[in-house]
Image: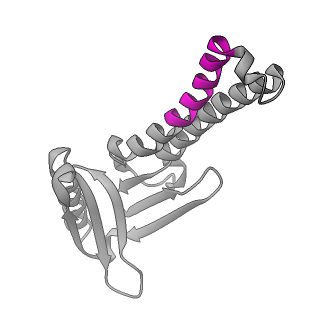
């Protein structure tokens, strides 16, 4: 069972599990890799110009700082991948779930009963959204519940159609 499936009741049948589009990982992973490059650069400079780095402080401190920066980069990469894996949309035969993991310790799960669903729409914005086929899927219900928006959805048009088909079966 994936971490997304744990929000589903055992008496429900899962029809669809969708994670965010892979492109949503590009900026966080690129940022983490840049942090790691600083650590690698420190080690490169240590090997190339050890006498200049001694002016900053003891070489052991420079090595420790470089190792800490690389370790931080690895932790950031793992954290971003875990957060990515816990963000998603789950469609069952009764309910539409949206799981939002905003950090390693903060998670929101929203759910809409399919019979209360009024409309599902998909939107793609910009050149990259169209090129890589990602966008937002918005589910609207009757009542006081807020709209459910699944950002970075891969193939948003297909997802919206699948949700609407499931809604028609529940009616």
Task: Pick the residue in front: 73 or 137.
Answer: 73
Measuring 27% from the left and 62% from the top, which residue is drawn there? 137
Q: Is residue 166 at all visible to an observer of this figure?
A: yes
Task: Pick the residue in front: 91 or 101.
Answer: 101
Left or right of 165? Residue 32 is right
Task: Pick the residue in front: 94 or 60.
Answer: 60
State how many labels appear: 0
Measured as percent of width and height from the top left, residue 102 is found at 54, 57
Q: Is residue 42 magenta?
A: yes
Measuring 49% from the left and 48% from the top, which residue is drawn there? 4
Measured as percent of width and height from the top left, residue 103 is found at 59, 53
Check the picture and name the quadrant holding the C terminus: bottom left
Magenta stretch: dominant secondary structure: helix
Q: Is residue 133 magenta?
A: no
Measured as percent of width and height from the top left, residue 164 is found at 20, 64
| Placement of 38 over or under 164, stated as above or below | above
* Quadrant of residue 64 within the rendered picture: top right
Q: Is residue 2 at all visible to an observer of this figure?
A: no
Left or right of 51? Residue 143 is left
Task: Pick the residue in front: 11 or 148.
Answer: 148
| Placement of 85 over or under 36, stated as above or below | below
Measuring 60% from the left and 17% from the top, which residue is drawn there? 44
Which contiguous range is marked in magenta?
Answer: 33-49
* Quadrant of residue 71 within the rendered picture: top right
* Quadrant of residue 117 within the rendered picture: bottom left
Measured as percent of width and height from the top left, residue 110 is found at 47, 67
| Placement of 106 over or under 4, stated as above or below | below
Q: How is the model colour-coded? A: one colour
Left or right of 162? Residue 21 is right
């Amino acid at each position: 069972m994936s971490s997304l499936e744990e929000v589903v009741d055992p008496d429900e049948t899962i029809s669809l599990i969708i994670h965010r589009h892979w492109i949503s990982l590009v900026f966080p992973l690129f940022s983490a890799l840049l942090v790691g490059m600083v650590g690698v650069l420190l080690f490169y400079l240590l090997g190339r110009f050890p006498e200049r780095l001694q002016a900053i402080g003891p070489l052991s401190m420079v090595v420790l700082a470089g190792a800490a920066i690389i370790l931080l980069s690895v932790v950031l990469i793992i954290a971003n991948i875990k957060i990515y894996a816990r963000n998603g949309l789950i469609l069952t035969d009764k309910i539409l779930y949206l799981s939002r993991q905003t950090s390693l310790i903060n998670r929101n799960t929203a759910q809409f009963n399919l019979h209360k669903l009024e409309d599902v729409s998909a939107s793609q914005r910009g050149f990259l959204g169209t090129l890589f086929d990602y966008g937002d899927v918005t589910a609207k219900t009757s009542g006081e519940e807020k709209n459910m928006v699944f950002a970075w959805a891969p193939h948003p048009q297909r997802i919206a159609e699948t949700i609407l088909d499931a809604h028609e079966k529940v009616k």
